[in-house]
Image (tube, helix red, strand yellow):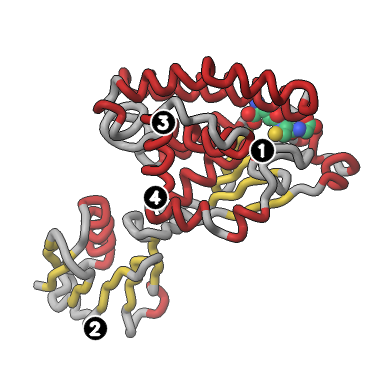
Amino acid sequence: MGSVHSPGTYLQSLVHRLMHRLGAQFTVGCTGVILADIKKPRSRPLDPQVFFLSSRWLCIRRASRPDILRSIPGPETPRSSMHDYTFIYFGVRGRVEAARILLADQGQDWKEDVVTFDLWTQGDLKKKCVFGQLPGFKDGDFELYQSNAILRYLARNHDLYGKDNHEASYIDMVADGVEDLRMKYAKMIYQNYEDGKAPYIENLPKDLRPFECLLSKNHDGKGFIVGSKISYTDYALLDILLTHLVLAPDCLKDFPLLHAYVERLSARPNLKAFLESDARKARPINGNGKQ
Ligand SMILES: N[C@@H](CCC(=O)N[C@@H](CS)C(=O)NCC(=O)O)C(=O)O
């Protein structure tokens, strides 16, 4: 009997199903390197096979049966190919940045289908968008609009929606609070930057205080905004806070918990790499160059 060592249950069940399909007998260990040598097939002798998990793929090689040479996405790998994510959006951070931050932190790949101003104003893309606006999003053939629906879709895909209905509801509540702030910010940036910036910054503590307050009530502000693990709303909140730190670098000086929260999340290795990446730096925050 061969043995397979896999790092998690999802992978184990995947391996079980594949082995079963191949008619091989096997056992599945629980940790360690993925390496299996299948020696006793159920029905007929098979060539020795090697199963391994690279950083992207669980690969099954069978020398004598190239027709069943298969590649299966490895779900627990840092860069997963289970999904085929594409953002269709203008070349800015804007309403996609929270989702980019989420995917980067979760070790996911995605593609950017960048829409130029000319294409948007002259082509018929706008007509094809459900609400006549971007961002659009695809996961393979699945197409979605509305930035917050996209975030929640990703949250469901990557277990970023809390542990139960109460947590999920708080997570949504915070996300709606972030959305309110985003709308105010966008109105000032796009409609009233010159005259509106100073009063906006003056009023900002009133808008930020509820988040500081919420944070203080959850693990003394030392963890995430809701619950005990990161959720999609942390990414949305982090994004809007980073955006405001550009607008008003001192805006968190009276909010020690939010300040530490931003530092803590931004230091997560995948996030740090993304936040410091040239691709991100090259994207302006907003479409009119104001920030
Ligand atoms: N509620 C929408 C708002 C989308 C939105 O405001 N999109 C802007 C860019 S951020 C847009 O498409 N502007 C071009 C237009 O309206 O023609 C969402 O969250 O996705």
Q: Secondary structure at mark 1?
A: loop
Q: Measured along the vertical axis of the image, is residue 148 above or below residue 116? A: above
Q: Which residue is mark 2?
A: 47
Looking at this view, is 95 or 7 the one in front?
95
Residue at the spot of label 4: 267
Front disc: 2 or 4? 4
The circle on residue 258 is 3
What residue is drawn where x is 60% and y is 49%? 86
Any atom of ligand 1 within 8 Å of the CB at mark 1? yes
Residue 236 percent location from the top left of the image = 50, 33
* Ligand 1 contact, mark 2 (Cβ < 8 Å): no
Can the viewer see residue 20 in this picture?
yes
As measured in the structure, the alpha-carbon distance from the residue carrying label 1 to the one carrying label 4 is 27 Å
Q: Amino acid at mark 3?
A: Leu
**Label 2 close to label 4 by CB (< 8 Å):** no
Which circle marks residue 170 in the picture?
none
User: Splitting the image into four quadrants, where does ligand 1 fall?
Assistant: top right
Quadrant hosting residue 265: top left
Disc 1 vs disc 4: which is toward the camera? Answer: 4
Callout 1 touching callout 4 (CB < 8 Å): no
- Between the residue at mark 1 and the residue at mark 2, the CA separation in whole angstroms equals 49 Å
Q: Quadrant of the N terminus?
A: bottom left
Q: Are marks 1 and 3 in contact (CB under 8 Å)?
A: no
Label 4 secondary element: loop
Of all residues shown, which one is farthest toward the right? 122
Cα distance in 3D space between marks 2 and 4: 47 Å
Instruction: State the separation of the CA atoms marked 3 and 4.
Output: 14 Å
Q: Which SS class for mark 3?
A: helix
Residue drawn at point x = 38 percent, y = 34 percent? 231
The three-letter amino acid code for the residue at tag 1 is: Pro
